[in-house]
Image (cartoon, grey):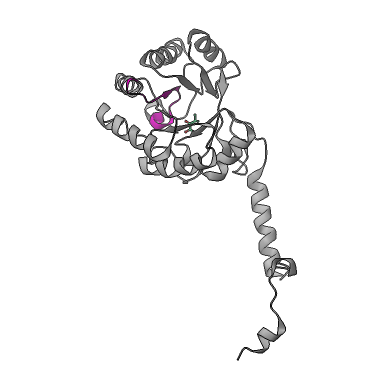
Amino acid sequence: MVTAYDYPGALHAQNAGVDLVLVGDSLGNVVLGYDSTAPVTLADIIHHARAARRGAPDTFLIADLPFGTYHTGVTDAMRNAVRVIQETGADALKVEGASPEVLEVIATLTRNGVPVMGHVGLTPQTATAQGGLRVQGRDEAGAQAVLDAAMSVQQAGAFAVVLEVIPARLARVITERLHIPTIGIGAGPHCAGQVLVTHDLLGIYEGEHKKIAKRYAEIGALSTQAIRDYAAEVRTRQFPGRENSFVIKDEVLDKLY
Ligand code: KIV
């Protein structure tokens, strides 16, 4: 699974043959320039998921329900879920956490035919309450809490669950105990699947090296260099060249006054 937030991103993901595309609310960090996912709105997700759907029409597409869109009761959650599904064509939705309220939302959505992916461990929408962006489930109580969260998300009806930033061996235990697939990010190699934020794997942001990600390209550096080359060629009048220009006959120009 990889994230995509627009038409080209989703097109590349589909062409690469990934199994799942996630329109994650990491949108806030990597596309919209916020320092967290909290400011991402339902309108943002709908706008971006519509574009991603057009880029990946044949790949299972999951959209995040943003912070606040499923925290004011199951009726609001259901209404917002229906909007995302109807307005974007997403196949499923993802929600974070395993509080009783979130579990009720997962149960309500799945009972009403909306497939839901859960997300436990580090949950960026509420990371401040977790003490920041840090590894979850390291001590006995914490590990038990993450296992319990994953089990209850499954019990509530989720078809899969993201495990974010937890120890690899804890992810292994959870993966073995659950019958739904686990999708790991910063959770080691034993999960059923893996997810990365595409901007991290493509190396869009120069100089940013996250422990949980691997940079498979340096697209950020390539982009900056390409734009620098273009600007230099414009300034030295090397671009546009003859091959980029259109011709007109002399007699047409001669008739101008
Ligand atoms: O928003 C996101 O991109 C996510 C993934 C990191 C799982 O939730």
Residue drawn at 42 percent across, 45 percent down: 47
Task: Give percent across and percent down for residue 67.
Answer: 36, 34
Residue 68 at least partly seen: no
State left or right for residue 147 relative to residue 68: right
Magenta-drawn segment = 111-127
Task: Give percent across and percent down for residue 228.
Answer: 67, 58
Quadrant housing the C terminus = bottom right
The stretch drawn in magenta includes residue 193: no
Residue drawn at 64 percent across, 52 percent down: 224
Image quadrant assignment for residue 198: top right
The stretch drawn in magenta includes residue 118: yes
- Give above or below for 32 relative to 162: below
- Give above or below for 252 relative to 228: below
Image quadrant assignment for residue 226: bottom right
Quadrant housing the N terminus = top right
**Residue occupying the far top of the picture:** 177
Task: Give percent across and percent down for residue 66.
Answer: 38, 35
> In front: 251, or 30?
251
Residue drawn at 47 percent across, 40 percent down: 27
